[in-house]
Image (cartoon, helix red, strand yellow):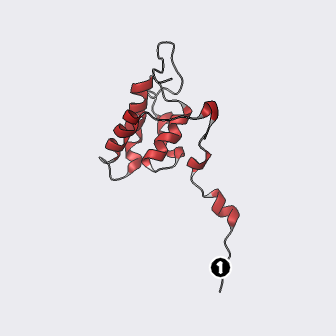
């Protein structure tokens, strides 16, 4: 018996990371320092999702806040769906998703 693949279902199951901005003003790139620090944290946990909060804190420490594009970049480094990182970012009130008046992104 030959199984037919339901492409609509397969497409729906693609990781959310595929929706990450690729170019233009929405593109986001982690600094080498941020990427290395996130990789370092990732290896402290059996499940990479557990490193999400630490990764968010790393970006926030460098930039003063966590831009939307950082969610996708962090997810890529950790190898998890961006929705998992977004869930952590929105759950914790000390993760700032918008720049405050006093924070400036030194990397922009």
Q: Nearer the viewer, residue 24 or 104?
A: 24
Q: Residue 62: percent from the left, percent from the top?
A: 40, 26
Q: In the picture provided, is 57 more to the left or to the right than 43?
A: right
Q: Is residue 86 visible?
A: no
Q: Nearer the viewer, residue 7 or 28?
A: 28
Packing grade of label 1 (10 A; few <14, some 14-19, many >=20) is: few
Q: Residue 67: percent from the left, percent from the top?
A: 53, 30
Name the residue at the bottom extreme: 1
Quadrant location of residue 4? Answer: bottom right
Q: Residue 66: percent from the left, percent from the top?
A: 49, 29
Q: Residue 94: percent from the left, percent from the top?
A: 43, 27
Residue at 46 percent of width and 35 percent of height: 30
Image quarter hosting the N terminus: bottom right
Q: Is residue 45 visible?
A: yes
Q: Dot 1 corresponds to which residue?
A: 3
Residue at 66 percent of width and 83 percent of height: 2
Name the residue at the left extreme: 44
Where is 8 relative to 101, above or below? Answer: below
Secondary structure beneath label 1: loop
Residue at 62 percent of width and 37 percent of height: 23
The number of callouts visible is 1
Q: In the picture provided, is 48 more to the left or to the right than 75?
A: left
């Amino acid at each position: 018996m030959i199984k037919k693949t339901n492409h609509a279902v397969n497409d729906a199951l693609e990781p959310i990371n595929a929706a990450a901005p690729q170019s233009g003003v929405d593109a986001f790139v982690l600094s080498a320092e941020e990427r290395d620090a996130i990789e370092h944290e990732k290896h402290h946990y059996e499940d990479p999702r557990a490193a999400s909060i630490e990764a968010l804190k790393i970006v926030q420490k460098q930039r003063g806040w966590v831009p939307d594009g950082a969610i996708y970049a962090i997810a890529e480094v950790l190898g998890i769906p961006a929705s998992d990182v977004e869930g952590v970012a929105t759950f914790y009130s000390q993760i700032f998703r918008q720049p405050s008046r006093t924070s400036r992104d030194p990397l922009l």
